[in-house]
Amino acid sequence: MFVDDDLDILPLYELVGEIDDTLITVQKGGLSALSFLHDLNYAVDAVVLDLSMPDMDGITLTRQIRQNENLRSKANPIKVFWFTGWPFDENNVNDPIVVGAEENKVIKVYKKPHDPVNIIHEVKAHFD
């Protein structure tokens, strides 16, 4: 599932998923994503989300996912990936985004602008 408030990019994720034969759901914003996840009892494999959204930021959404994913097997946690336009230094262990990613068991943080095709391939590689 991809979560972003940028309506221009969401169709691109769906298109790339169709070309790549990957089921991708997109959600406009954190609150709709949280509702969608709740309706599915958190039965998704991966969530790729924007950190900066007006209704619920990505860090809060990730915390909600981690708190509620106990509705599914804890042996198979949801793989979470972030993307952001905020500046951060991925090599600085004290950078707030790096710290937040570590605390929330985020697999990778992508910097904007990002390549949806690359992200989809990288996410899929975690299931091979």
Image (cartoon, rainbow, N blue to C red):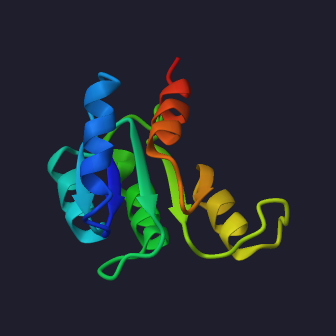
Residue 43 is left or right of residue 75, and the answer is: left
For residue 66, side relative to residue 26 (left or right): right
Residue ranking furthest to the left: 39
Task: Tell me: residue 5, above or below residue 3.
Answer: below
Q: Residue 59's spot in the image, x, y percent?
A: 49, 70
In this rendering, position of residue 3 left or right of residue 86: left
The residue positioned 39% from the left and 64% from the top of the image is 64
Q: Quadrant of residue 53?
A: bottom left
Q: Quadrant of residue 52?
A: bottom left
Q: Can residue 22 be seen in this snapshot?
A: no
Which of the pair 102/27 is nearer the observer?
Answer: 27
| Viewer-proximal residue among 27 and 44 | 27
Name the residue located 55 percent from the left edge and 63 percent from the top edge: 112
Examine the rendering and report whether any part of residue 95 can be seen: yes
Task: In the displayed orientation, state which residue is furthest to the bottom.
Answer: 54
Residue at (50, 23) in percent of width and height: 127
Task: Tell me: residue 26, above or below residue 93.
Answer: above
Give the residue at x 50% y 30%. 121
In the image, 109 versus 35, the foreground residue is 109
Decide if residue 9 is on the left or right side of residue 96: left
How far across and down, in percent of the image, does residue 48 sit? 43, 51
